[in-house]
């Protein structure tokens, strides 16, 4: 009886909303029959060792149906012009949602992009997205790969048309959002609902941070001490990134001549700067760097000690007092660092059936 | 039974809350519509596209091939200085010299108004958080108002040709694309225009013409010379100047 009262009150509240947009209001479909589909909210929990989420969960709370829709979209080639290259084409779960054999991303018609597909994890905690911060909100990030000619080479309008004409999507959109309507807002919000749930927080490192029953080996402990002293000024905190943009001294590759964040800001000071990537799952997210030029963690550490070239925007942290460039890390310390970096691998995440394509 | 009575009372309260009118003495009028018509002009006369030429203060002649801009976040100011905020998700409009130049606003509370506030571009604090604002993307995309490498809007797309007054036949293309630069630089501007009091009601659709003086893009707070720079895209020095100039280009003549 009491529940019925609440239900009637809720209906009245709905009727109060003066939303005149094309079906965005949460109203029951068609006549007075209430939605029969149940769509429970998913539990988005911030791990106890994590900072607060940056994504506004309250504005787009993940639901069971929204998440399922987002997942279907993520793995659907219809988002690309050739009907094949889905988001999941370059973002493969077992590699923490990056790609191993593609140094830079591959797109429709065998086209090759200019940057290395980034892993997807803990996106709900990031301020900006892509290597240069070209997307300031997770909800808008997918516009870039969908519309890039060398990636999915499609238009958002066309995607909406294809999904509207699909046998399944109109129903799935209605179930996820409570009323009829396939539109861009819902497309991006569903993708975000899927992506914000991709929280990777169950590595050995996390368990140690949370005081769970794990112990680091001597080598891992030694590696962590070196990491804290020499890497953590940029790869800072639990997320292993301070989310800044920096020039780490990579020699310019004339094939791409990538100006980095300058493309977004137009500022010469941002020339050749790229986002400091999170090092979570770093063991399984090779190749490394914005253009995937380094294949192994050993290559990366060798680059940081001996491979840098100077340029006006090079981060000062890499300038040694004697004028040479790079970090001072011995061969033994490199082994210890790699042992530590492997503690950042979260096998539960890459095996989590919720995110799996099949 | 008592519970049922409580429910009836509750519903009655809700119904009252639904009614926008708190004063039982006045008659509630049905809402009305307002059409905002944007007229692109150059120094007071209606803009003609190329090959008509105009001259800026840097003594350069120019022609216009394309002029598009985004208007958003429309608010109406009532005579008592309170404001009616038009639903944000419905308040994004593309004004295109070669297409639609009207923002049709509907379901506005009947009242007397004296001012209009709107945004030039897309407010980064509202985009895309507020529900529905992402629905503007397909329209903006079709009009070429999205950056191709970045997930943001171009607020202004202004293209044409120019020549030095001494050699007017030798035309060079120019291109001004202005938007926000990631989270780094915000070129969104808010514009307030005051006008004679006007009523909005269900009887007839009000219409107001807002003039946009194209000449002010070059010459207003700042002076921009095409010979100095004919391509301004993601330009942290010049894009803010264009945005500032553009924010002075809107007016209402009655």
Image (tube, coloured by chain):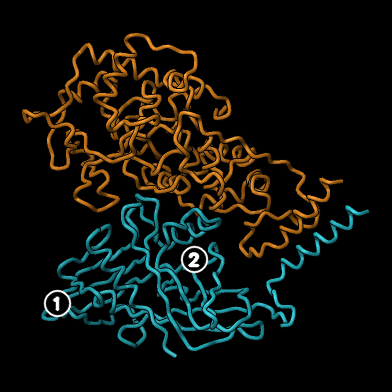
Q: Residue at x 42, y 72 (%)?
A: B96
The chain letter of the orange chain reads A
Residue B104: image location, x then y, percent: 54, 75
Q: Nearer the viewer, residue A323 or A121?
A: A323
Residue A81: image location, x then y, percent: 46, 45
Residue A260: image location, x then y, percent: 26, 43
> Which corner quadrant of the image does residue A67 belong to?
top right
Q: Nearer the viewer, mark 1 or mark 2?
A: 2
Q: Which residue is mark 1?
A: B164
Q: Residue at x 39, y 39 (%)?
A: A107
The chain letter of the cyan chain reads B
> Which corner quadrant of the image does residue A106 belong to?
top left
Q: Is residue A85 visible?
A: no
Image: B121 above or below A38: below
Q: Is residue A250 visible?
A: yes
Number of callouts: 2
Whether marks 1 and 2 lie on the same chain = yes
Image: A108 above or below B23: above
Q: Residue at x 14, y 77 (%)?
A: B164
Q: Which residue is mark 2?
A: B92
Q: Chain of mark 2?
A: B
Q: Nearer the viewer, residue B108 or A188?
A: B108
């Amino acid at each position: 009886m009491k529940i019925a009262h609440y239900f009637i009150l809720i209906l009245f509240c709905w009727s109060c909303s003066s939303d005149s947009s094309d079906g965005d209001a949460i109203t029951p479909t068609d006549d007075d029959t209430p939605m029969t589909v149940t769509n429970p909210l998913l539990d988005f929990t911030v791990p106890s060792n994590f900072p607060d989420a940056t994504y506004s969960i309250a504005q787009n709370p993940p639901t069971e149906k929204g998440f399922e829709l987002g997942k279907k979209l993520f793995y659907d080639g219809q988002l690309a012009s050739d009907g094949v290259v889905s988001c999941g084409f370059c973002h493969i779960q077992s590699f923490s949602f990056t790609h191993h054999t593609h140094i830079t991303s591959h797109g429709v018609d065998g086209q090759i992009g200019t940057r290395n597909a980034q892993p997807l994890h803990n996106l709900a905690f990031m301020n900006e997205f892509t290597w240069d911060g070209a997307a300031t909100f997770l909800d808008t990030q997918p516009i870039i790969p969908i519309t890039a000619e060398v990636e999915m080479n499609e238009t958002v309008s066309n995607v909406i048309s294809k999904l509207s004409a699909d046998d399944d999507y109109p129903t799935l959109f209605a179930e996820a959002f409570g009323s009829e309507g396939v539109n861009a807002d819902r497309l991006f919000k569903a993708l975000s609902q899927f992506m914000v749930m991709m929280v990777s927080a169950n590595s050995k490192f996390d368990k140690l941070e949370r005081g769970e029953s794990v112990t680091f080996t001597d080598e891992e402990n030694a590696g962590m001490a070196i990491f804290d002293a020499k890497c953590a000024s940029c790869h800072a905190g639990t997320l292993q990134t301070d989310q800044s943009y920096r020039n780490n001294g990579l020699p310019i590759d004339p094939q791409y001549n990538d100006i980095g964040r300058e493309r977004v800001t137009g500022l010469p000071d941002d020339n050749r700067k790229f986002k400091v990537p999170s090092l979570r799952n770093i063991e399984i997210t090779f190749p490394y760097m914005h253009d995937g030029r380094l294949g192994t963690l050993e290559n990366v550490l060798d680059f940081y000690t001996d491979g840098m070239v100077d340029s006006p925007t090079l981060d000062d942290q890499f300038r040694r007092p004697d004028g040479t460039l790079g970090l001072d890390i011995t061969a033994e310390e490199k082994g210890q660092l790699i042992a530590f970096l492997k503690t950042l691998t979260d096998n539960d995440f890459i095996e989590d059936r919720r995110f799996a394509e099949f | 039974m008592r519970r049922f009575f409580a429910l009836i009372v509750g519903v009655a309260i809700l119904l009252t809350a639904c009614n926008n009118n708190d004063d039982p003495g006045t008659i509630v009028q049905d809402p009305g519509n307002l059409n905002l018509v944007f007229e692109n002009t150059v120094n007071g006369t209606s803009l003609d596209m190329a090959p008509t030429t105009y001259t800026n203060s840097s003594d350069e002649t120019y022609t216009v091939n394309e002029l598009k801009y985004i208007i958003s976040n429309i608010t109406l100011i009532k005579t008592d200085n309170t404001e009616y905020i038009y639903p944000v998700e419905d308040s994004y409009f593309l004004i295109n010299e070669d297409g639609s130049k009207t923002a049709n606003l509907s379901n506005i509370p009947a009242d007397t108004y004296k001012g209009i506030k709107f945004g030039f571009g897309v407010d980064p604090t509202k985009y895309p958080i507020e529900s529905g604002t992402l629905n503007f993307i397909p329209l903006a995309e079709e009009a070429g108002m999205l950056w191709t490498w970045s997930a943001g809007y171009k607020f202004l797309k202004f293209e044409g040709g120019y020549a030095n007054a001494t050699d007017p036949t030798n035309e060079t293309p120019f291109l001004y694309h202005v938007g926000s630069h990631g989270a780094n630089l915000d070129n969104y501007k808010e514009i307030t225009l005051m006008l004679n009091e006007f009523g909005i009601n269900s009887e007839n659709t009000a219409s107001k013409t807002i003039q946009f003086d194209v000449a002010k893009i070059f010459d207003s707070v700042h002076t921009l010379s095409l010979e100095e720079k004919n391509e301004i895209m993601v330009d942290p020095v010049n894009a803010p100047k264009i945005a500032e100039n553009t924010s002075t280009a809107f007016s209402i003549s009655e």
